[in-house]
Amino acid sequence: MKNSLNIILLSIVLMAGLNLSAQKQHFSENTASLEIEGRIMNTKGAYQVEVRRLSLVPDTFVIQDDRKKFRIYLEKNNCYTIRISKNGFADKLVFINTALPEDLDDLYRFSFDTHLISSQNPQNDGTLSGTLPDAFIYFNKEKDCFLYDRKQTERIREDLLSRAF
């Protein structure tokens, strides 16, 4: 467990800090193992979504419409970050591990709605905004689906903070 936590932490740190020039990722429903659908519920106007896989430059796109969903296809057995940003709000960072057992080749789906926190909010001091994951999503073999794990996300955040200070 501790070993896998260290691997996850190292992946997050590397993905957050990498800015390598390489080809962008363009995955289709045909090559993907996970379809992520997300929506911001509390903002008006456009927001930006950035998808990054280790060693690739991010794919960035702008969602123009209020409350419009975005859809991203991710390949099997990779680690990704999705950064959601909007002027005047703290970035939201989602970490996704698409590791699947070898015998599974299905397209799984994970959908979420979220809220962005205003940069004027007293709870948002801005110092770690967008650098620590707000959510960790992974495949749960017993439930045969991708899950958001609040406790694992909190453990990762606490471990990263303890290593940083």
Image (cartoon, rainbow, N blue to C red):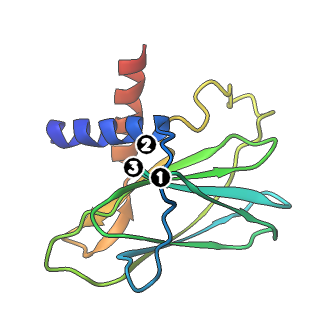
Q: Is residue 5 above or below residue 52?
A: above
Q: Position of residue 152 (x, y in %)?
A: 33, 45
Q: Which residue, as the protein is rendered here, is positioned at the far front?
A: 22
Looking at the picture, tell me which residue is in the foreground, 161 or 81.
81
Q: Is residue 117 above or below residue 40?
A: above
Instruction: Please tell me which residue is depicted at 27% across the width and 63% down the height of the picture.
Output: 77
> For residue 155, what is the image quadrant?
top left
Q: Which amino acid does label 1 sit on?
A: Ala
Quick one: SS at disc 1?
loop
Query: Upstream in the sequence, badge 1 or badge 3?
Result: 1
Q: Which amino acid does label 2 sit on?
A: Met
Left or right: 114 in relation to 2 = right
| Distance in Å between CA atoms under marks 1 and 2 | 14 Å
> For residue 33, what is the image quadrant?
bottom left
| Distance in Å between CA atoms under marks 1 and 3 | 10 Å
The residue at which mark 1 appears reads as 22
Circle 2 Cα neighbour tier, 10 Å, few/some/many (<14 / 14–19 / ≥20): some
Q: Position of residue 60 (x, y in %)?
A: 64, 58
Q: Are marks 3 and 2 in contact (CB under 8 Å)?
A: yes
Left or right: 45 in relation to 26 = right
Left or right: 131 in relation to 75 = right
Q: Quadrant of the N terminus?
A: top left
The residue at which mark 3 appears reads as 54
| Distance in Å between CA atoms under marks 3 and 2 | 6 Å
Instruction: Please tell me which residue is depicted at 37% across the width and 54% down the height of the picture.
Output: 149
Q: Which residue, as the protein is rendered here, is positioned at the far right?
A: 45
Quick one: SS at disc 3?
loop
